[in-house]
Amino acid sequence: MFSRILIANRGEIALRIIRAARELGVQSVVTYSAADKDAPYVKLADRAVCIGPPPANQSYLNIANIIAAAEIADVEAIHPGYGFLAENSHFAEVCRSCNIEFIGPSVEAMQRLGDKVQCKQLAVKHKVPTFPGSKGAIENEKEAIKIAREIGYPVIVKAAAGGGGRGMRVAHNDIALQSGLKSAKTEAEAAFANGTVYIEKFLERARHVEVQVVGDQQGNVVHLYERDCTMQRRHQKLIEEAPCPAIDDEVRNKLCSAAARLCKAAKYHSAGTVEFLLDDKTKKFYLLEVNTRVQVEHPVTEAITGVDIVKTQIKVAAGEELPFKQSDIKIKGHAIECRINAEDHTRNFAPQPGKLDQFIVPGGPGVRVETHCAAGYKIPPNYDSMIAKLITHAEDREQTINRMQRALREFDISPIATTIPLHQRLLNNSRFVRGNVDINFVERLLGQ
């Protein structure tokens, strides 16, 4: 086991990793920007190193400064959390060249699965269902139109190196496809320094279902069942739950086995998530992408399986074998997570930076809160607006929803506007309660 690791991230995930490391007897060093100097995780870590001013490209995305901090603090490994550099294979390669263990998959696995074109090709080879579409990158408009007409509109243009909804455009005809192709390439180039795009058939009424996998360096890969992330807006998730309420055990086994098979083929170790779109009518599923990191919504999987995913990541990176087999993993109850963002959803989700005068979190049986905030904390305007994750767990979905509604009422945050009123509205919606939703449900409900 490592004696000391560096956490190259911020917010609640930095605090989550500090806690996991401490329980393993591992010291933690956090990097922080000047905007985060008063954050709780900076004080709770064994050591903290300032790596730059507030702009992310001068601090949390500054690889040279992060490596310098790692060398100064004499760490053996770096945990990238999620976001920022978590899926950056170049960063993982730099860590390796500096003899620092990257707490994540190998560079080669990241490249195989992180590039959506390569990932799709690997999936096809190993009989993981994929959408009809281009076999590789789209070179020009003529090729794009030919493929779109063959598979039928609507289609979606996707960035090969994309994520978070960037570099994606839906097209219902040739003209929209030509426009979407240009804008997706431009956005992908700006966001990922890679303008490569491809085309797939687009499902207009689908669910977003993802499978959590973990693997070790000995070649073992185990799935921890699935999560339903259908409740989202503009490809940003709002509510996640596990297990998926729309599938039976037969579909569940096929889905989870396909995810594990793909990751094993990629020689994947660490935690990762294989994302699928599920046709709610036919129950057929199609590969969407693979996220080669821990996910924001990992706590719902931890709740229903009892597996500490972050601890497992650290153990696997240190060379340990997975402490469980597939037959050991059972689903226990139901869990839901609400992402609490400092946003005003009545004003097109405008960010709400500023000081928190009051921040009282809910509690009680089956309630978990992941946050880096407290009363007096100033939310900086420089980063993602998520300020907390609220997770509830109970014996079944109905009890879990009731518990979440109770917990949301107890959450007291002021004077900053948050997404809590929206979560309450969604949880009270009869279609959500019945489990009858699709990925465009929230936008239709809000008239967007």
Image: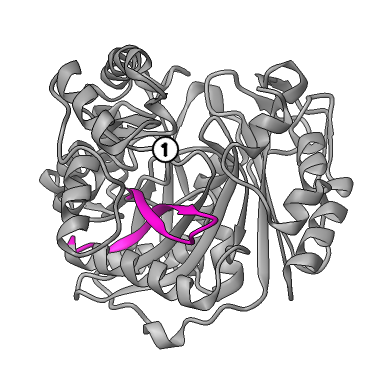
Quadrant of residue 258 in the image? Answer: bottom left
Can the viewer see residue 424? Answer: yes
Q: Is residue 305 above or below residue 207?
A: below
Q: Is residue 176 above or below residue 233?
A: above
Look at the image and say whether residue 285 sits in the magenta stretch: yes
Look at the image and say whether residue 159 sits in the magenta stretch: no
Can the viewer see residue 274? Answer: no
Quadrant of residue 310 in the image? Answer: bottom left
Instruction: Say which amino acid is labelled 1.
Output: Gly
Residue sitting at x 33%, y 77%: 322
Relative to the observer, which residue lies in front, 193 or 376? Answer: 193
Quadrant of residue 106 in the image? Answer: bottom left
Could you say where residue 314 lies in the image, as x and y percent from the top left?
A: 36, 63
Magenta region's main secondary structure? strand
Residue at label 1?
A: 83
- Residue at disc 1, secondary structure: loop
Could you say where residue 195 lies in the image, as x and y percent from the top left?
A: 22, 21
Q: Is residue 104 above or below residue 222?
A: above
Name the quarter where the C terminus is drawn.
top right
Residue stretch rendered in magenta on the structure = 266-291
Could you say where residue 94 lies in the image, as x and y percent from the top left?
A: 16, 39
Judge left or right: residue 12 versus residue 259.
right
Residue sitting at x 73%, y 32%: 445
Relative to the observer, which residue lies in front, 398 or 125? Answer: 125
Relative to the observer, which residue lies in front, 396 or 1? Answer: 396
Judge left or right: residue 105 versus residue 58.
left
